[in-house]
Amino acid sequence: RSWTYPKIVRLAGCLVKRRFLAGDAICKQGEESHVMYLLRKGKVSVQKEVTYIDENRWPNQEGDYTVLTHERTVALHLCDLEVGDHFGEEIALGHPTRQYS
């Protein structure tokens, strides 16, 4: 939002217009990062998948413990982006894969 006009003109030469429908996943966490996005219209929800491992232990009749492990992955909402915001700059920062969805 605070870019100078010459920077915007230079960037515009590199832009490709893409459209997405509401609810479409634009990029997914863990994918290779090749593209940066500049939001021209609409809103984007940014999420990060986190895996939790729950472990329950209780004594059994043999004097040992029974262990039950449960793994689940949830999507945490990080933020909403609006017109003028950008995302997907991981490749420019040296990250070869997406850090969020």
Image: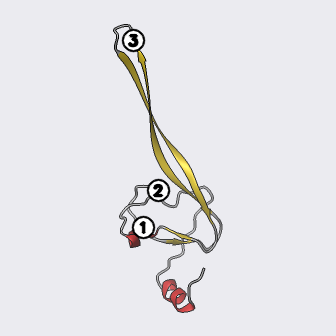
Q: Secondary structure beneath disc 3?
A: loop
Q: Residue furthest bottom?
A: 6
Q: Are marks 1 and 2 in contact (CB under 8 Å)?
A: no
- Which of the two discs, 3 and 1, labels the residue nearer the N terminus? 3
When asked about the image quadrant of residue 17, the answer is bottom right
**Residue tagged 2:** 28
Closest to the camera, between mark 3 and mark 1, is 3
Looking at the image, residue 93 lies above or below residue 63: below
Dot 1 alpha-carbon crowd within 10 angstroms: few under 14, some 14 to 19, many 20 or more: some
Q: Percent position (x, y) of residue 9?
A: 53, 89
**Residue tagged 1:** 90
Dot 2 alpha-carbon crowd within 10 angstroms: few under 14, some 14 to 19, many 20 or more: some
Q: Which mark is residue 60?
A: 3
Q: Percent position (x, y) of residue 101?
A: 50, 56
Q: Residue furthest top?
A: 61
Q: Percent position (x, y) of residue 51?
A: 45, 42
Q: Secondary structure beneath disc 2?
A: loop
Closest to the camera, between mark 1 and mark 2, is 1
Dot 3 alpha-carbon crowd within 10 angstroms: few under 14, some 14 to 19, many 20 or more: few
Closest to the camera, between mark 2 and mark 3, is 3
Q: Quadrant of the N terminus?
A: bottom right
Q: Are marks 3 and 1 in contact (CB under 8 Å)?
A: no
Q: What amino acid type should be assigned to the residue bearing mark 3? A: Asn
Colour setting: secondary structure
Q: Secondary structure beneath disc 1?
A: helix
- Which of the two discs, 1 and 2, labels the residue nearer the N terminus? 2
Q: CA distance from mark 3 to mark 1?
A: 49 Å
Q: What amino acid type should be assigned to the residue bearing mark 1? A: Glu
Q: Residue at x 35, y 64 (%)?
A: 96
Looking at the image, residue 14 lies above or below residue 98: below
| Left or right, 35 with reference to 86 | left
